[in-house]
Image (spheres, grey):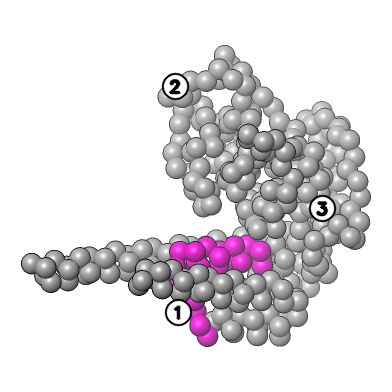
Amino acid sequence: QLEQEQQSNIEAHDVLVSLLLGSLGSATTDATQLLEAWESIQNNFDTLFITENSIEQLKQTILQLAVMGKLVSQIPEDEPASELLKKIDEAKAKFINEKKIKKQKPLPKIIKKEEPYSLPHNWEWIRLGDATNYGITKKIEASKVEEEIWVLELEDIEKNTSRLLKKVRFNERRFKSTKNIFNKSDVIYGKLRPYLDKVVIADEPGVCTTEMIPLKGYAGILSEYLRWVMKSPYFIKYANDSTHGMNLPRMGTEKARLALIPLPPKEEQYRIVAKVNKLMTLCDQLKSSLAMAQTTQLKLTDSIVEKAIG
């Protein structure tokens, strides 16, 4: 009975957390509304974030606020994203002229009704296929791979956190299939369900399964910002809604290239990445403290039970 009551309390608690965190996302960019929504959470922080699930919800809210332009302040002096769009077009044209990438079929212009939510005035929407080289991937056969090259597989990345669990070299992981080539600072995105939130940034060159797509922004798009966008609830929902196949569903290349990416000024991207990294670290520390407290409680309970029946 106690366990059932506790489970009911946990479920009710999670609903409350969802409602309060949802109020942050639904608030407009008006500072007063955001402040009021945050104060409701802040005043009850110690009683809200006491389970792993509630902390995970907090992480997801942080990412959603980041891609909506609600996590850091906009600075009028920042060069607007509209100028960044021009630089992206110029960089892409240069790569095509230099034959570094092939010219792709033009993607349709973004229309107002496609936009999933409103952005700050100095942000812009851009399609993933226009912002990055998604789907323009170089491949390599096993016979041409060097012994010490990094071979990345989906299993090497922790679900949800995208933490790299291990690095395996070709001399430890032989393969015969074709692999995708990636470079240092490329964002590597797992397109296969249920791994749609596995996204890492390469710290050295390597090769990966073709179920992972290496990509990089053309100009003025930080890899770190792009990674957080692709891990945000907004993008994960788009990816889940865009998969095909029964046994191993995956997001197709064309669907991915059509995805809308919220584009802030470059200076704001730096601020967003710094703030998200800091808050994610704090959430991880909170989760560690919670785990330690739970372990201590279990030890204490075991000790009491041993003495009671001893």
Magenta stretch: includes residue 88: no
Instruction: Say what secondary structure mark 1 lies in.
Output: helix
Decide which of tag 3 and tag 1 comes sooner along the chain.
1
Label 2 sits on residue: 171
Mark 2 belongs to which amino acid?
Asn
- Circle 3 packing at 10 Å, graded few (<14), some (14-19), many (20+), is some
Q: Residue 126 carries which label?
A: 3
Residue at 46% over, 36% down: 167
Q: Residue 122 carries which label?
A: none
Mark 1 belongs to which amino acid?
Asp
- Circle 1 packing at 10 Å, graded few (<14), some (14-19), many (20+), is few
Mark 3 belongs to which amino acid?
Ile
Magenta stretch: includes residue 54: yes
Which span is picked out in magenta? 43-65
Residue furthest toward the top? 143
x then y, percent, for residue 213: 66, 37
Q: Is the magenta stretch mostly helix, strand or loop?
A: helix
Disc 3 and disc 1: Cα gap in Å? Answer: 39 Å
Is residue 190 at all visible to an observer of this figure? yes
